[in-house]
Image (cartoon, coloured by chain):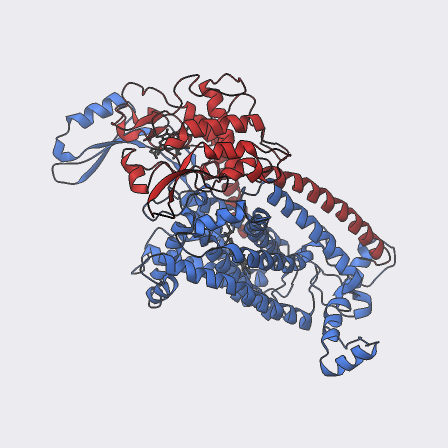
Amino acid sequence: MRFITLAAAGLATLALASAGLAFAQEQRPAHEFGPEHLDEPEGGWSFEGPLGNFDQNALQRGYKVYREVCASCHSMKSMSFRNLGQKGGPFYDPEFPNPNDNPRVKALAADLTIPAIDEETGDEEQVPAKTSDTFPNPFKNPAAARASNGGIAPPDLSVITSAREGGASYIYSLLTGFRDPPAGLTVNGGQHYNVFYPGDTGSQWAGDPRLKPPGGFLAMPPPLKADGQVTFDDGTPSTVKQMSKDVATFLAWAADPKQETRKQMGVGVVIYLLIFAVVVYLSYRRIWAKVEH
Amino acid sequence: MSGPSTYEPKTGFTKWLDARLPIVRLGYDSMIDFPTPKNLNYWWTFGGILALCLVIQIVTGIVLAMHYVANTSMAFASVQHIMRDVDFGWLVRYIHANGAGMFFLAVYIHMFRGLYYGSYKAPREVLWILGVVIYLLMMATAFMGYVLPWGQMSFHGSSVITNLIGALPIVGPAVKTYLLGGAAVGDPTLNRFFSLHYLLPFVIAGVVILHIWALHVVGNGNPTGVSVQDIKKDTVPFHPYYTVKDGFAIILFLTMFAVFVFFFPEAMGKTDNSIEANPLQTPAHIVPEWYLLPFYAILKSVTFDIGPIPAKLLGVLAMFGSILILFALPWLDTSKVRSMRYRPLARQLFVLFVLACVGLGFCGANEPDAFVFKTGKDRLQVEYSDANGRAQTKFFDQFSEANAYKESLPTAAGASLQVAESGFKWKWLSQILAAYYFIYFLVLMPLLGVIEKPKPRPASIADSVHKRSGSGRSSSAPVAAPQHAE
Ligand code: HEM
């Protein structure tokens, strides 16, 4: 009997010790996340935490960066122009509860043309987009997207912050993480070195494999290269960091456009449940008061 | 247990109905008047929580099915449509997706409760077996549900699991073909998974009815494991005593559920499943949802062949075996004592068993060859084949030396230079824990009944609660056992 207990206790100690050591070492292979941690913009993200919210100005600036820079390569198939004017969206205006009436959203849609069929002649033509249209795709088809980007199609950005470990911080880090490769690291043509890209530099590193540089190579050239590349309407200086932060904010909203409603509702639901719990607990005490249990 | 019925129809209509279809009587006897031991603790509230979970999954699932499109080119987009355009679609989907995890959390607590208090022992064997059937059906349902949103993990996870089924001898390949509806996961697979995912929850509901029927024949167990002797002294009617206690527990559970749904809806999700399925691009790590991780770890822990049986098949057998073993538990446990409150050895081994299951969960989430912890410094190794074509490895500390050595070898040696790491691998931890899992059921359970000396048990339920509430009336019962398990 003693033996079983001892053996079992030994086993438990081993398991716990390994778990402890694993956490203490906090092993994260260098190639998984680039340098130690992802970068975060100064001041963090306004929308993080259970009560955080999107900053509408940041969303508007972010949309502009997406539209003027990223949209030439990346589609956002799940987004329609009307989404921009929905509650919690970049151009929401309480005066226009129906985003299809919102003049700013209408104008943003009409800025762009989309392919359509002329009902009279059956010919393909380009017409201005309407609020109900989805964001136009920069490429006619996936093959064209690959052909223009060195064989790798740019991913759709509709839910990109949910699709990458690190979310908005990853997008921000990726956009600000392009560096000149250190000596000893060969970068193939059409590839770009980024310290945060979750790739592997091992095969192209000439030095000690234990000291291989963090990050990896991707087919996207640095999209945000110079301060002032996009002019912000609200006068915010458009540094590369600011543009990266704002476009990451916009993408985080696009992936989770109901966040504001969700959190507001959540506060109400949880408070309601807690009050209900107290009431039911008191009735429980009362009902059981006369029963020995 | 459910003694003679005390229902008395009062109105003309209920009298008329009771003589023809005594359905009101059935409800009254099983949910109002049902005699329930008065000493049940909060671990007994999870049955009610589970029933609620099933209802929540069915209701939200039916709404989702109204908007979901089971077609490989539209499934992913239809889920986005639910999240963005359907009124409160995001809420329904987040409840359904997180609800699956909540359902499993509750079922695991419910099952560990059963293991600790010996709820599987006579006369509750059939009740326990029906529970294990429900659990198996839940796993099948959740697995198929996870394929529906057609993300990367949906696709590649289902490929891995159906390949495992294909590895089973004799029936494997045929079952796999019927499941997939073709050579690989594709449109036919998605359609039949959707159909089965819609069907199985109703099968679960059917088995739940049998489960509750069996419960009402033999009655609830209780933390002392001592059977009800006197309905008057030992039990209280289910309503209002347990409706209010279960109700309180349900509200606390729903509060936790709501915190996930509203504030951390994607905490339990995988980023890879937000990428549309792409058969040509395999994700770096394929891992199932958290609630299936321990079994996945058992599957991967088998890395050796035994005789003619290859490791892959052994792993599959171990994985299925680890669940099927639960069916035999009522006969594996030889102890006469139900509750582990009075089984000092079994209680400690049970705690270790819970730790092993949790540990296996962590193992399942990690690559088998990754290190739990590392020992020593990383070194360098040069691998090459010598003049006779035999594989050789030479270790170095300095990169310059290793590199010089590699360069000095002829090209025919095919030398390569790698990092040599040493430490304790996840696969070893999962082997130890999986071994304990099986030893617990196959060796310790049968053995303990023979060698363990149980502590004295209270004479009756009434007696045990009487002692606890501390009134001084003496009783003939033996000295009470420690009451910490409440
Ligand atoms: C035993 C009860 C059930 C369990 C454990 C379960 C589990 C799941 C899981 C894990 C998913 C994937 C969640 C995601 O990531 O989106 C899912 C999706 C889905 N389930 Fe269920 N489910 C259950 C009952 C039902 C029922 C009764 C229906 C329909 C009548 C249903 C319809 C759906 C649909 C349409 C989806 C795909 C939409 C989506 O992915 O959000 N489910 N289910």
Q: Residue at x 77, y 76 (%)?
A: B5
Q: Residue at x 58, y 60 (%)?
A: B58
A274 up-or-down from A30: above or below: below
Of B346 and A74, the residue lying toward us: A74
Place of residue B64 in the rendered image (x, y in percent of width and height, measured from the top left)? 54, 55
Taking the view exactly as shown, the residue that stands out farthest to the bottom is: B19
Q: Left or right? Give the position of B6 relative to A50.
A: right
Residue A262 showing in the rendered view:
yes
Place of residue B78 in the rendered image (x, y in percent of width and height, measured from the top left)? 47, 50
Of B231 and B335, the residue lying toward us: B231
Of A169 and A128, the residue lying toward us: A128
Q: Residue at x 49, y 49 (%)?
A: B79
Of B226 and B9, the residue lying toward us: B9
Q: Left or right? Give the position of B129 relative to A231.
A: right
A203 up-or-down from B77: above or below: above
Q: Quadrant of the N terminus of chain A?
A: bottom right
Q: Quadrant of the C terminus of chain A?
A: bottom right
Place of residue A288 in the rendered image (x, y in percent of width and height, measured from the top left)? 82, 56
Residue B326 showing in the rendered view:
no
* Chain appearing in blue on the rendered image: B
Taking the view exactly as shown, the residue that stands out farthest to the front is: A120
Determine the colour of chain A. red
B277 up-or-down from B464: above or below: above
Q: Residue at x 60, y 45 (%)?
A: B261
Q: Left or right? Give the position of B74 relative to A234.
A: left
Could you tell me how many numbered marks the image carries?
A: 0
The quarter holding residue A194 reads top left
Place of residue B123 in the rendered image (x, y in percent of width and height, measured from the top left)? 64, 71
